[in-house]
Image (tube, rainbow, N blue to C red):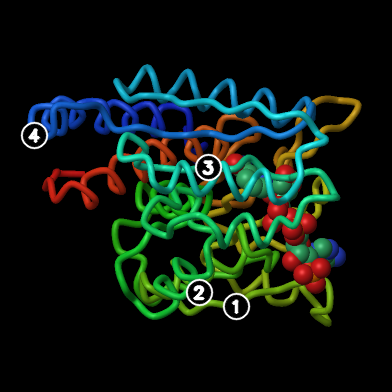
Amino acid sequence: MSATIINGKAIAAELRARVAAQVPAFRDATGRAPGLAVVLVGEDAASAVYVRNKGRATREAGMESIEHRLPDTTTTAELLDLVGRLNADPAVDGILVQLPLPAAVDTQAVIEAIDPDKDVDGFHPVNAGRLATGLDGLVPCTPLGCILLLRTIHPHLAGLEAVVVGRSNIVGKPMAQLLLRESCTVTVVHSRTRDAFAHIRQADIVVAAVGIPGFVPAAAIKPGATVIDVGINRTDTGLVGDVDFAAASEVAGAITPVPGGVGPMTIACLLRNTLVAAARREGVSLDL
Ligand code: NDP
């Protein structure tokens, strides 16, 4: 059997086009474009690429990209001051502080300083709490992208057995919450799980967010399962995911490739979140 390859690039392009198509209505209603402020601290090469791509995608969607590049000597106090100014700026609808921050900076304090209604990464505890309690909030981009990919295969997710591998605050935990919101039966496995593969083998849906190349082998996948590979691991042979893609695609029913799966959805969902944040702030109703 050969799995359906879920084309994240194409699905992300559609979402970006849907967002871009709504921007003129927002402009007409408010007289301005939605604005996304991105803050990059230091010289991390991967972060610089992400920030560049986010800026380009924001402009392509017809939105305003406001970029702040700060040296790696920036202090927590300086960063909190900048976040405070962005919170108060009416032209800024979304604030994204690119992680990781330099070790000397108090990352949690910076995340918590962002106005939750401008928190387009969805990492603020208020947004985590809203997600956990079923309130409208801003949802982390990567797990949201995974749900949108899953819906292309399973229009109805209710009742499916889902296993999330990983429990980080930015991927695993919000992923589990979103799957629960979709009425899946959710298991989260992590480094202290006794037999992770025994759980994964039961799953109709596997979301792998571990950060270990090829961690999930084909033998752990139930035939016909849908596999979403969040992992981005740089190896000698290039970028690989957390799933053994070549072998797994012979067993799974559908699977995301790396690259070209979840990655492009993350940026598309960031644009979506920026527009949602902007529309909520201005009381404009959009059709997203
Ligand atoms: P973290 O390192 O924060 O979390 C990894 C998780 O995997 C932890 O919960 C850890 O468990 C768990 N884990 C580690 N080893 C094992 C094991 N042997 N068995 C079971 N679980 C294990 O990573 P992130 O969540 O930030 O990222 C995960 C991956 O996703 C990375 O490759 C990252 O690059 C990628 N990523 C991709 C994005 C995209 O846009 N496509 C966006 C964000 C991340 P424990 O908690 O017990 O330590």
Q: CA distance from mark 1 to mark 3?
A: 30 Å
- Disc 4 marks which residue? 29
Q: What type is the residue that disc 2 sits on?
A: Glu
Q: Residue at x 83, y 82 (%)?
A: 194
Asked whether the residues under the numbered discs 1 and 2 touch, taking CB atoms below 8 Å apart as contact, a structural biologist would say: yes
- Disc 2 marks which residue? 161
Relative vertical location of residue 140 with respect to residue 89 in this rendering, above or below: below
Density class for disc 2 (Cα within 10 Å; few <14, some 14-19, many ≥20) is: many
Image-based side of 109 in relation to 186, left or right: right
Which of 112 and 235 lies nearest the eye of the viewer?
112
Mark 1 or 2 closer to N-term? 2
For label 4, being within 8 Å of ligand 1 is answered no
Residue 199 is marked as none
Asked whether the residues under the numbered discs 3 and 4 touch, taking CB atoms below 8 Å apart as contact, a structural biologist would say: no
Q: What type is the residue that disc 1 sits on?
A: Thr
Density class for disc 3 (Cα within 10 Å; few <14, some 14-19, many ≥20) is: many
Is residue 85 visible to the viewer in this orientation of the structure?
Answer: yes
Q: What type is the residue that disc 3 sits on?
A: Leu
Mark 3 or 4 closer to N-term? 4
Mark 4 or 1 closer to N-term? 4
Q: What type is the residue that disc 4 sits on?
A: Ala
Q: CA distance from mark 4 to mark 1?
A: 44 Å
- Disc 3 marks which residue? 96
- Disc 1 marks which residue? 187
Q: CA distance from mark 3 to mark 2?
A: 33 Å
Image quadrant of ligand 1 equals bottom right
Q: Nearer the viewer, mark 1 or mark 3?
A: 3
